[in-house]
Image (cartoon, grey):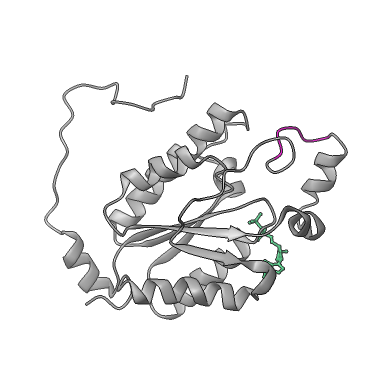
């Protein structure tokens, strides 16, 4: 089974400390490493806003990269489905990848529904203080369903998809996200701008 949730199976492992620490990386790249964890219902706008933020950051010269849900399911997580334990493992692996990117000094944006608070908090727990930025893309179900960019709600309502978040699978909203985007009242640019503003305010960007 894939559920490597606890201690490593292998013995005699040593964590090698490199010669370049976070501060050195931050002054080389002009920003700190962090994980921007977008969470919200399917069609809420995680991917659209995440990619806009990525573009804004890269245009400022930052090392930023979106980890997109479907893309990861094609590769790294192609063995996982949508049962609760598989969703948990999906998020655990993505969290580990995100942590590596952030450790390398990058601004990694993840755009996964990540419906369970426990799973998101586990990823938060992997990161150092201030390195996990939870972005709640808060869009009411009715609006997500009206947008239905991938036609998934239609399929789910027709009974072709089961365990669909928001319909017959739960979504646990973040209790205190670092950034809360109510996309009903925001354009994509405005929403992305709020995320970048948060990074500026927290001195994650512009560190030298
Ligand atoms: P998710 O990644 O959360 O599943 P997507 O980003 O794929 O969602 O889809 C969101 C859809 O909603 C896109 O078609 C996008 O153009 C549309 N949309 C309309 N208004 C907004 C907004 N204010 N913010 C984000 N997306 C919006």
Q: Where is residue 159 in the image (x, y as percent from the top left)?
A: 85, 34
Q: Looking at the picture, how far across and down is residue 188, in whole percent?
A: 63, 73
Q: Which of 196 and 81 is in front in this view?
A: 196
- Quadrant containing ligand 1 reads bottom right
Which is nearer the eye, 182 or 72? 182
Considering depth in this image, is 201 or 78 the residue closer to the camera? 201
- The answer to whether residue 109 is left or right of residue 186 is left
Whether residue 40 sits left or right of residue 150 in the image: it is left
Magenta residues, dominant SS class: loop
Decide whether residue 202 is among the magenta residues: no
The quadrant where residue 114 appears: top right
- The residue located at (60%, 53%) in the rendering is 40
- Residue situated furthest right in the rendering: 158
Could you say where residue 185 lies in the image, as x and y percent from the top left? 67, 73
| Vertical side of 100 occupied by 157: above or below | above
Question: What is the span of residues highlighted in magenta in the rendered image?
Answer: 160-164
Image location (x, y in percent) of residue 184: 69, 68
Residue at 81% across, 51% down: 151
């Amino acid at each position: 089974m894939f559920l490597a949730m606890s201690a490593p199976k292998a013995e005699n492992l040593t964590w090698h400390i490199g010669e370049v620490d976070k501060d050195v990386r931050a002054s080389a790249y002009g920003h700190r490493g962090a994980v921007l964890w977008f969470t919200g219902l399917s069609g809420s706008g995680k991917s659209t806003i995440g990619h806009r933020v990525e573009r804004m950051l890269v245009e400022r010269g930052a090392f930023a990269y979106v980890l997109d849900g479907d893309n990861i399911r094609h590769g790294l997580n192609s063995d996982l489905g949508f049962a609760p334990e598989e969703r948990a493992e999906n998020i655990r692996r993505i969290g580990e990848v995100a942590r590596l990117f952030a450790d390398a000094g990058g601004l990694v944006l993840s755009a996964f529904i990540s419906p369970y608070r426990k799973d998101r908090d586990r990823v938060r727990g992997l990161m150092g203080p201030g390195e996990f930025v939870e972005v709640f893309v808060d869009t009411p179900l009715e609006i997500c369903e009206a947008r239905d960019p991938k036609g998934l709600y239609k399929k789910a309502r027709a009974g072709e998809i089961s365990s669909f978040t928001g319909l017959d699978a739960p979504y646990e909203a973040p209790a205190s996200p670092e950034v809360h985007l109510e996309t009903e009242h925001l354009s994509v640019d405005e929403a992305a701008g709020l995320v970048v503003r948060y990074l500026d305010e927290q001195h994650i960007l512009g560190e030298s």
